[in-house]
Image (cartoon, rainbow, N blue to C red):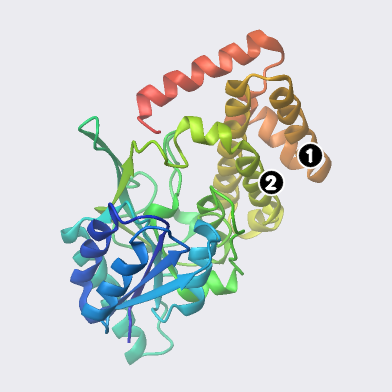
Amino acid sequence: MKYLTFVVPCYNSQDYMKRCIESLLPGGEDVEIIIVDDGSTDSTGEIADYYEALYGNIVKAVHKENGGHGSGVNQGLKLASGVYFKVVDSDDWLDETAYQALLDRVRKHCIEKEADPSAEIPDLFVANYIYDHLEEGSSHMVSYKNVFPVEQVCNWNEIGRFHPSQYLIMHALVFRTKVLQEAGVTLPEHTFYVDNIFAYQPLPYVKRIYYMDIPLYHYYIGREDQSVNEKNLMKRIDQQIRVTKIVSNCIDLNEVKKEYPRLASYMCRNISIMMAISSIHLLLINTGESYQKRKTLWKDIKEENKSLYFRLKYTTLSGLTCFPGKFGGMLTIQGYRMAKKIYQFQ
């Protein structure tokens, strides 16, 4: 049995993918590592084949036409045989000690399930992640110990409050593969920022959560070609808007609220953050077209879901990013710059 499937989507990743893969290999035959070569034009495919040849019981190399990060995740999910599923971007890596702690816990739950099929195991593991600004020589860890009880199974009605700088991103999450399949997670191709969908859509299907206060995931920040780089985000703003709309429409938060009111509140806040990111970067682009797109984004939300629109505009962070006029836009940008400096996000 494979307890944990790792999927590593790769596109022209030859310069850094070895560090990622090497950090996953210590899981041995309890894990599978699916390296998805997404139509690379450098040596990525050869490196993937090398690891498959060397570690045939652990590594599988997949070669496909270019379809973007989401396409690589989709392919990995189709092939996954592990009880749990995690995406690791090819420029990131796992802390070895934390990784072994996670795998020990996953293995324990899976063995209990094998011995007693009626046993309930976690649907989601949550762990801390680290922003690594390697060029600046700095790092910043995001912890969730104020939100989840440490190393206890809990549900969404037992969680605490998220701080302003906290939200559940893909790097912090290890889903039960079955949950992702039940949620129907299929990410759009040729689109950046789809990790937001991955970290959002399955949440209502999660009944049991297990949080480990360990620094598991190293999230590399600072490369010029990264999608979260501010210049690239402005260049790809239409894709950010597309993903924001998909997230806002993929789950009925009123239905979620009936069973898990705290989760519904968090999910609304998550949409608010995405709306704020879209609004702010449209302001940063600072053209007549970008201002019109900002108006249209809010208009579309209002037409599709009025109750969500009013919550986003009047009770959440995103409402602070749609002040009218140029002066309102300046206030929004100043607030964004200050938050970026304090919380050290990209």
Q: Is residue 26 left or right of residue 207?
A: left
Residue for point 64% across, 53% down: 257
Residue 300: give its label: 1
Dot 2 or dot 1, earlier in sequence? 2
Name which residue type carries label 1: Asp
Instruction: Return the residue nearer the eye: 328 or 19.
Output: 19
Percent across and percent down for residue 170 are 44, 54
Could you classify mark 1 by the number of other residues whose Cα lies within 10 Å: few (under 14), some (14-19), or many (20 or more)? few
Q: Could you tell me which secondary element the residue under label 2 belongs to? A: helix
**Relative to residue 318, is residue 190 depicted above or below?**
below
Amino acid type at mark 2: Lys
- What's the residue at 49%, 22% (across, down)? 336
Q: Tell me the residue that label 2 is attached to.
A: 245
Q: Are marks 2 and 1 in contact (CB under 8 Å)?
A: yes
Query: Quadrant of residue 71 in the image?
Result: bottom right
Q: Return the residue nearer the eye: 196 or 117.
A: 196
Is residue 207 at all visible to an observer of this figure? yes
Residue situated furthest right in the rendering: 303
Query: Between residues 90 and 346, which one lies in front from this camera angle?
Result: 90
Q: Give the image location of residue 231, x and y in percent.
A: 49, 30
| Outermost residue toward the top in this view | 327
Q: Can see residue 320?
A: no
The residue at 62%/48% (across/down) is 243
Check disc 2: other Cα within 10 Å, few if <14, some if 14-19, many if 20+: some
Viewer-closest of 116 and 93 = 93
